[in-house]
Every structure is written in C-alpha cells, then in structure tokens.
Amino acid sequence: MSTATVAQNDHKEAQDFMPINGTDYLELYVSNSKQAAHYYKTAFGFKSLAYKGLETGSRDFESYVVEQDKIRLVLTSPLKSGTDVGRHIDKHGDGVKVTALWVDDATYAYNEAVKRGAKSYMEPKTEKDEDGKVVTSGIYSYGEVVHIFVERKDYSGTFLPGYQKWESDYQPTSTGLKFVDHMVGNVNEGRMNYWVDFYANVMGFKQIMSFDDKDISTEFTALMSKVMSNGNGRIKFPINEPAPGMKKSQVDEYLEFYEGEGVQHIAVATDDIVKTVSDLKSRGVEFLTIPTTYYDVLTERVGEIDEDIESLRKLGILVDRDDEGYLLQIFTKTVQARPTMFFEIIQRKGATSFGKGNFKALFEAIEREQELRGTL
C-alpha cells in the first residue's frame, strides 16, 4: 500500500518553537567563485550584490553574492591550498555547504536546537559595521551541510558585515525566479528516518508528506522520500534515501559522486514558468527531456489548466494536480562537472504537493541521462 499521504500521525506533537522567516541565503563552495557568479548571472538572471575577498581583508577565501528577488546565492572559493573550503570541494565538488535561515533571534534558535540535540557548528557571534549588526549561529545537519541562523533586524547593509557592495556594469535581466520553494537532501540508505526525527525534534518541523518506493520507482530504480516543513511552511526539506532496485538509482549515483550526503536540488519558484523556462533555455540552461507522449493524456490526468499544452510540450514542463490545485515543474540537468546538484523550476497554482504524478516520467528522464553517463 502506498504511503504517499499527508503524514498526520508522525511527529504530530511537533511544536513550532523555532520561528523561521524564510531562507536567508544559500552558500555554495565552488572551485571558481568568479566564474560561477558569472554563470548564475548569465544563465539564471541573478544580479551582482556583494563581495568579500582580498580587497575586503579576507585572505583565505573569496565570496561573490548574487541575488534574484528573494533568492541569494553566496559562491565561495579558497584563495590558497589547505583550507576547509578547498577540502570540501576536493571531496564533494561544487555543492551547497550552508542553508542560512532568517530568524528573529539567532541566539535563541541556536540554544533551542543544541538543547534538543543538534551538533554545534558555530556559537552565536555578533558582527558589526557602519550599517549595524548581525547575529549568526549555526548547527550541523546531514553530511557536511550546515544551517546558519541569521538575525538581521538591526542591520541595513547590502548583505552582511565584512562584505562590500559589488558594483558591476553587467546586470542581466531577471528570469522571473522569486524564492526558494524547497531544498532536497540525499542521505544514505536507512538514514532518512533519522533525519526526519532530527528536523522534528531539534527544529520543530513537521512531516507533511511521505513517498515510498511504490510511489517513486521505475522498472529499474527506486527511492523513498519524506518532506519536512517548518510551522509557517516557508522552509520545506524533502529527505531522500535510495531503495533497492534492479539498477543504481539517482540517489545512489549522487551519493557515489558527491562522496556523501548532501543537497540534491534547489527548487526555485516563478509566477510564469513558461516565460521563465523559455528565458533560461535561451541563455543556455539545459533541462531534462520528457517524451512528448506524456502530453497526449495530460488533460485527462490533471484536468483543465490555464497554460497552452503545446507550449508545455515544447519546453518539457511537467504538470500535476492535488486537492488544492495544480503545479508546473521542470528540472535542469546537473549544473557542475559531477552528476550531483541540479535545480527545479516550479510554479504553484494552489497545489501544495511535490508532483507525485510526475515521478515516473521524471525518473525515467534521469535514467536516460544516467545511461549516457554509464552510471545506471
């Protein structure tokens, strides 16, 4: 029997004792931050925001910060050998190190998390400049990913103390990306429930959905997933683990090439997915391809929708419906050398789910890519 249901029994006692206002920023450790910033500006429509490096007194690493609406990416590279940032890149390749969460009180959030069993990454510290002060603290989560709590109510600067405004003549137009909708983690087999419990007990999240290997499977591969959400629903963390299958699943491939647990994909929201994806494709972003037969029965499966089916077919955009409405989604190919992290573009028209009806088509598309790479 399928377990793809809204989970109301697991962790029903979860309390929202740690209010989170939203995602503050995502920090990626990358091998060349300058070139990565140019890529995210050119391909995804981000704009220059802030910089930290030799010119600001940072001797060990440099960071470029890019922004689009409510999405901020910090792209960080080492400036010399033997650094923790460099070791992370050597082991994992480019990937997400920090998921920063915007809170009203970073000291309170840290103390509550550590009291409930979180491993400390960074005790609360206050940094100041002429624009005010910011308090940050941090805890470890799965793999080497960390959550940093950011309290910025007394700060009016561009980004954070220690950064300067990044002035750039090159500011591409936006592609319509609005905010981080959710962020998916891949963990080792048998560890999904451990991290579900972590987010419930340590951070007060609740489980809102569960998918087993009957929901997320093809002829060859399978995985399982549970979705954790904070109280106001602004932070959603699906947690995936591999399930036994005839061949190596996408999660297995990720764990092999990332050499551990980590962030599989970042889902970013748009209000007009057809326009956004058309823009992204024109800028060179590559997406997974879906057989056109998927669209032959689309209306029968999801009912009437506002969008033109032929436009969706041409772009390869997927559609699914739940009790609240429908959603449109599409997935990029991986955005770095290793077959690890990628992006999802999502537009919600009432739907609060994650596209269960698209899993088979999506996973078959991923398997075609795995086959080309010789990793299936």
Image (spheres, rainbow, N blue to C red):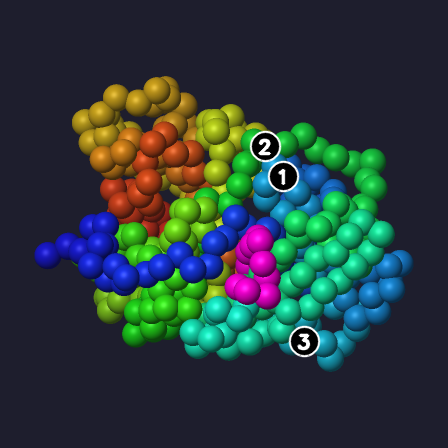
**In the image, which disc is placed on residue 33?**
none
Asked whether disc 1 touches disc 3, contact meaning CB atoms under 8 Å apart, the reply is no
Type of amino acid under label 3: Asp
User: Looking at numbered disc 1 in the image, what kind of residue is underneath it?
Assistant: Gln
The answer to whether mark 3 and mark 2 are in CB contact below 8 A is no
Kind of element beneath mark 3: helix
Which residue is nearer to you in this view: 146 or 78? 146
Element type at marker 2? Answer: loop
Disc 3 and disc 2: Cα gap in Å? 34 Å
State the SS at label 1.
strand
Residue 213 found in image quarter: bottom left
Visible residue check, residue 26? no
Q: Earlier in the sequence, mark 3 or mark 2?
A: 3
Quadrant in the picture for residue 127: bottom right
- For image coordinates 79% across by 59% down, the residue present is 128
Question: 30 or 130: nearer the eye?
Answer: 130
Q: What range of the chain is rendered magenta?
A: 97-109
Q: Nearer the viewer, residue 35 or 169?
A: 169
CB-based contact (under 8 Å), mark 2 and mark 1 = yes
Rendered position, 201 above or below 156 = below
Looking at the image, residue 376 lies above or below residue 189 = above
Residue placed under numbered mark 2 in the picture: 175
- The mark lying in front, picked from 2 and 1, is 1
What is the number of the mark on residue 84?
A: 3
* Horizontal side of residue 339 vs 70, given as left or right: left
Q: Would residue 37 appear left or right of 271 to someone viewing this image?
A: right
Residue 68 badge: 1
Residue 73 part of the magenta-drawn span: no
